[in-house]
Image (cartoon, helix red, strand yellow):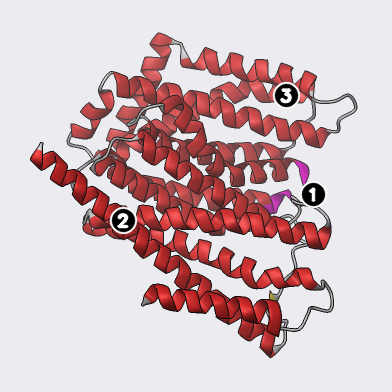
């Protein structure tokens, strides 16, 4: 029960900070809408729906990266991360709290962005939406760990996309496949597998990334 | 001695691959690059695996030696990975007429992995030397190895028609002499990679020791 209450406290902290500061969520929302407009001009005339789905996933990944960067860089600069690591709680609660908070922001943004996409480009069916949910979880899980690594060094804003993008490739494959392929279910299974494997791995290895002694 | 046997091994492999083995009926002379390309690819995977193993040892046992060993193994893996992509492109150009194709699973998987490990170096060079860097690099190396089967499954969901499947479930689809040549080549390239690994590791350890001595004297 203690573990769970730590996670809830950390997630609530992030959500409360965002509610008061209101800087990450509007930025992510505006970013994703602007990208959708850019897509309209990026896609050639008469491009089919499949291309639009592909670009949707580019938008999702980069919006998630934006959210992750803002979530972690601020914490590092204000020494909050060090404080949390020193606190007498299981370090993986930090990772889980951050992942859940980032996931919440991403979902909040997508509540607006996905209908906008469906309106402007192509419809999204249930398989596609489940794919989006699963992939969101995957990006936030892996992204939180990579962000923890990246913020410790120099050039952290550049490093985070570099670390996350290769890992995001199976998620993009899964997401686009779920939207485009007639056998969408297999792609959903892939996404679920990815989430299970990498969430567990990230959860287990977070401790090693933020601490220095064994 | 190890370097000598690696040199002999590579010489023997090249002799077998270029001269002794009969030409492939389907692809002609360009098939011979298979004897170099596939062992290099397998060795790249092996080096990444070795890097991940050393990374696991670092996190598990906490011995600092393993950080440099992991780094050098991944460095070798990246070098052999680059060679894989280059030899593969040459083979692709000779066989299929294109330098690259997205419809081959193995190519795409390898490219993703190569990209992943290139980012490893970006991570490493942006962090200050110390236990934080060692542990972050180790965790990242482990992620790479886990990424291999997951990416493989992901990329396989799209069908692969072009990349020749030489090793099927029925066993190697080639004659005994070709298989022997392949095995000799594979053993030789692996040995070569290991020699490079030892040489680079020794060099880097020497460099580290020299730096420590300089700091002590200053």
Residue annotated with mark 3: A117
Residue in view at x 90 percent, y 27 percent: A46
Within the magenta stretch, is there residue A181?
yes
Nearer mark to the viewer, of 2 and 1: 2
Instruction: Tell me whether circle 3 and circle 1 mark residues in contact (CB < 8 Å).
Output: no
Q: Chain of mark 2?
A: B
* The magenta segment: A180-186
What element does badge 2 sit on?
Answer: helix
Q: Is residue B169 visible?
A: yes
Q: Chain of mark 3?
A: A
Cα gap from disc 2 to disc 1, whole angstroms: 54 Å
Residue annotated with mark 1: A182
Residue annotated with mark 2: B203
Residue B110 in picture, x, y percent from top left: 60, 55
Q: Is residue A96 visible?
A: no
Residue A43 in picture, x, y percent from top left: 80, 25
Residue in view at x 31 percent, y 38 percent: A93
Residue B39 in picture, x, y percent from top left: 58, 70
Residues B60 and A194: in front is B60
């Amino acid at each position: 029960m203690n573990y769970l209450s730590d996670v809830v406290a950390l997630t609530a902290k992030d959500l409360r900070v965002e509610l008061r500061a209101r800087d990450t969520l509007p930025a992510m929302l505006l970013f994703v809408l602007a990208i959708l407009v850019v897509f309209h001009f990026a896609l050639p005339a008469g491009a089919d729906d499949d291309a639009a789905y592909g670009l949707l996933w580019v938008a999702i990944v980069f919006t998630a990266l934006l959210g992750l960067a803002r979530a972690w860089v601020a914490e590092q600069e204000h020494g909050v991360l060090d404080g949390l690591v020193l606190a007498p709680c299981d370090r993986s609660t930090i990772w889980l709290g951050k992942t859940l908070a980032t996931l919440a922001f991403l979902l909040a943004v997508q509540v607006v962005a996905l209908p906008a996409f469906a309106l402007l480009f192509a419809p999204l069916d249930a398989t596609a939406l489940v794919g989006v949910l699963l992939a969101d979880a995957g990006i936030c899980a892996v992204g939180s760990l990579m962000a923890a690594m990246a913020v410790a060094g120099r050039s952290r804003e550049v490093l985070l996309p570099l670390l996350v993008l290769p890992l995001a490739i199976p998620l993009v494959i899964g997401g686009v496949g779920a939207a485009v392929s007639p056998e969408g279910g297999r792609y959903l299974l892939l996404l679920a597998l990815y989430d299970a494997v990498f969430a567990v791995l990230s959860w287990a290895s977070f401790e090693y990334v933020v601490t220095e002694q064994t | 001695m190890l370097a000598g046997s690696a040199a002999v091994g590579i010489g023997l492999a090249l002799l077998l691959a270029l001269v002794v083995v009969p030409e492939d009926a389907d692809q002609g002379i360009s098939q011979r690059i298979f004897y170099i390309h596939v062992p290099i690819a397998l060795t790249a995977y092996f080096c990444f695996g070795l890097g991940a193993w050393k990374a696991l040892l670092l996190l598990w046992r906490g011995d600092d030696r393993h950080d440099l060993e992991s780094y050098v193994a991944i460095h070798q893996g990246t070098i052999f990975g680059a060679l894989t992509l280059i030899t593969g492109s040459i083979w692709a150009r000779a066989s299929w007429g294109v330098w690259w194709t997205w419809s081959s699973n193995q190519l795409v998987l390898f490219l993703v992995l190569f990209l992943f490990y290139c980012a490893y170096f970006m991570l490493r060079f942006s962090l200050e030397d110390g236990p934080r860097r060692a542990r972050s690099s180790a965790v990242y190396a482990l992620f790479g190895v886990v990424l291999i089967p997951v990416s493989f499954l992901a990329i396989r969901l799209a069908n692969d028609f072009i990349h020749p499947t030489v090793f099927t479930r029925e066993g190697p689809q080639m004659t005994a002499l070709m298989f022997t040549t392949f095995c000799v080549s594979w053993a030789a390239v692996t040995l070569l990679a290991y020699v490079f690994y030892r040489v680079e590791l020794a060099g880097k350890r020497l460099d580290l020791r020299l730096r420590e001595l300089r700091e002590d004297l200053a």
